[in-house]
Image: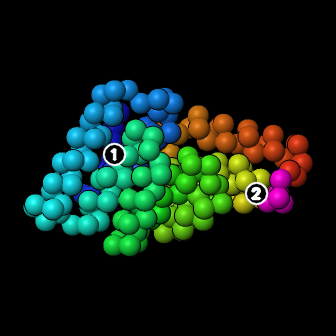
Amino acid sequence: MNRKFILRPLRVSLERWLDFVAMDDRPTASAYASSLVRIAFVTVGYYLVGMLPERNHWQKGHAWARIGAYEWAAWHFRKYLKYSDDGAGRWALGWCYANLGMPGSAVEHLRLAYDRNKRPECACHLAEVELDLGNQTEARSVLAEIVARKHELSPELAPYLSHLESRARDAVSQGPVGPGAT
């Protein structure tokens, strides 16, 4: 898979977040081991070498999210946002909240992330959470923006976008449901 990295080295490529979305329900033992070793290594680097706090929290949040410990990951991403309030941190926090079953908080952070960085991957996550909340109008408007920029999508996102579009069509045919339905 061709990986593109954001210019700032302390951010994981946004495409790697898709690896988390596609991750099995239960991480393997090697994923647990590598995440815990990474957390220990980052902690030592923070206290002994003088790693920056935002890098410390970003890497720990990433490691916790990799093994499905979204509460811990969200805590670290919130701490990361104290030091560096940017779109990648908001996206990561929104993604954690969505996995924790907190779609209201997830939408808030994903909207902020998408406003700061109009990446199609972030827009797909935002549209999905908007559909989960029943905000059909907002989800359709985000999907329309993604479709207009379909050429920017990675090959892995094309089926995901098709799935979201069919889900939005199904939601329209079923009519308004839920408290946030429009």
The residue where tag 2 is placed is: 135
- Location of residue 127 in the rendering, given as x and y in whole percent from the top left corner: 64, 52
- Nearer-the-camera pick, 71 or 169: 71
The residue where tag 1 is placed is: 63
**Residue at 69% across / 54% down in the picture?**
130
- Nearer-the-camera pick, 181 or 57: 57
Per the image, label 2 sits on a secondary structure element best described as: loop
Hey, what amino acid is under mark 1? Ala
**Residue at 60% across / 62% down in the picture?**
105
Q: Is residue 179 magenta?
A: yes
16 displayed left or right of 48:
right
**Residue at 21% across / 47% down in the picture?**
40
- Location of residue 181 in the rendering, given as x and y in whole percent from the top left corner: 82, 57
What segment is highlighted magenta in the picture?
178-182
Q: Quadrant of residue 171?
A: top right
Q: Quadrant of residue 158?
A: top right
Q: Is residue 95 magenta?
A: no
- Location of residue 14 in the rendering, given as x and y in whole percent from the top left corner: 41, 50
Inter-mark Cα distance, 2 to 1: 31 Å
142 displayed left or right of 168:
left
For the N terminus, the quadrant is: top left
For residue 74, the mark is none
Per the image, label 1 sits on a secondary structure element best described as: helix
